[in-house]
Image (tube, rainbow, N blue to C red):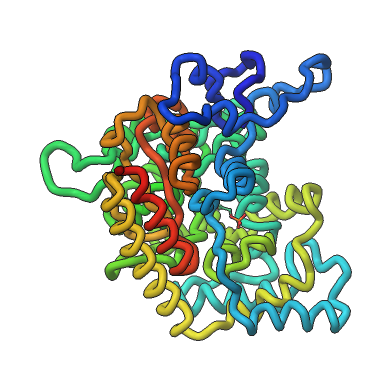
Amino acid sequence: MNLRRPARRYPSRMGISHEALPSRISPPSRISKEALFNLPAPPETRPRFRSHRAAAMTESVIREMSRVAHRYKAINLAQGFPDFEAPEEIKAAACEAINRNINQYPITWGAKPFRDAIAAKYKRHYDLDFDPEREVTVCCGATECMIATMMAILDPGDEVVAFEPFYENYGPDSIFCGAKLNLVKLHSRTLPGGEGPEWTFDPDELRQAFSPRTKAIILNTPNNPTGRVFTRRELESIAALCQEFDALAITDEIYEHIIFDGAVHIPIMTLPGMRDRTVLISSLSKTYTVTGWRVGWALASPDLTDSIRKIHDFLTVAAAAPLQAGGVTALSMPAEFYAGIAREYQKKRDLMLGALTGAGFRCYRPEGAYYIMTDISGFGFPDDLTFTAHMAERAGVVGVPGSCFFKDPASGAQNVRFCFCKKYETLEAARDRLRKLSV
Ligand code: PLP
């Protein structure tokens, strides 16, 4: 995140520019947020060589926060990666693959044993049938799956719908395609007229976001950053609009196995009429504790897969061959493995809910994924960046400023997101440190 860059041609686009904020605010802590966040800005002397695309986006705030944590030796509860080990058998399978000389390019859309393992897993878990030859594309993480899918489907001027707050990559992904991102608010309180979960959408607002130019909706459930797991009813209303407007659902389901309190993850692809109207994206990263492996997959009907594979091929050629071999072992883990990760993460969620509430945060209780979105208004800070700077200095803990999940930074200015995919000892140390915020 670079606060010193001059105003951009597309100032309010995603990737999220915060350059309006620093002059307005004087942080109550000794360390300024400029000092905390700024990296030296490169000279802006050659605009000819900065594309509109590059100018329209900023550094990822989430990834920047990991660098901030490093710099200040703070506990990193920002970027969502575990500090504990991946399962031994998965690591061993990847090492063994390297030693068996599985070190050359695999088939561009995925090694056959891995595509077979993916198809078998979806049959086992969701009773979905995929033809590994024509409906499975392995990419470098869900990240590349999403870019390849959007580039395969969208032309400049097309529209794509997503819920806000949203995982920040979807903004730059739309910019890459020249597509317009129409955002629909997930309201953080119960909607007027009845009981309901936090972070849900108003069906009328969702309908208004669709138009004849809408080619797709991006659906991330379990959701980052809110922790929502969309219900069958919500999914049905999304599916109905996809069918009415002849649009696709592009789903990001990478937290599919991290669900709490009996919540059930339902791939929208399993709903009537959605099998050929969905591109289902997931990855090894979160479920198997291997975020650094960069292996994911996109599942879709043959016509969509054909386009996705072509884009993927020319973007990256293929995901790492020996890690796809490790993935075969990962995807063959028994049912107890999945029950175990949900159980463990629920305990960690509860620990962190207690730690954050005790320190003065208002917490939104996640139903899935491994983040807690908080409301920091009780601390009396003007915005999330100022508060995050204060927290890094005063408590030695780093979270993600909530504004990076919103198009208009003001909408998330009283939110900070914490991840809890850490060892118990890390979370307990964070709990002890966070107490310093309330004294
Ligand atoms: N999608 C969401 C919603 C995420 O939260 C993340 C990482 O935090 C990703 C995608 C990245 O997935 P991958 O590591 O498979 O590229």
Q: Nearer the viewer, residue 41 or 201?
A: 41
Q: Which residue: 49% across, 40% down?
A: 393
Specify whether 77 is left or right of 140: left
Q: Which residue: 49% across, 29% down?
A: 30
Q: Nearer the viewer, residue 235 or 260?
A: 260
Quadrant assignment, res 301: bottom right
Q: Position of residue 138 (x, y in %)?
A: 69, 62
Relative to 113, does residue 278 appear above or below in the rendering?
above
Quadrant assignment, res 38: top right
Q: Position of residue 44 (x, y in %)?
A: 77, 17
Classify the position of the N terminus by image quarter: top right
Whether residue 402 can be seen here: yes
Q: Position of residue 103 (x, y in %)?
A: 86, 72
The tally of labels here is: 0
Classify the position of the C terminus by image quarter: top left
Q: Which residue: 44% across, 19% down?
A: 25
Whether residue 246 can be seen here: no
Q: Nearer the viewer, residue 351 or 304?
A: 351
Specify whether 236 is left or right of 80: left
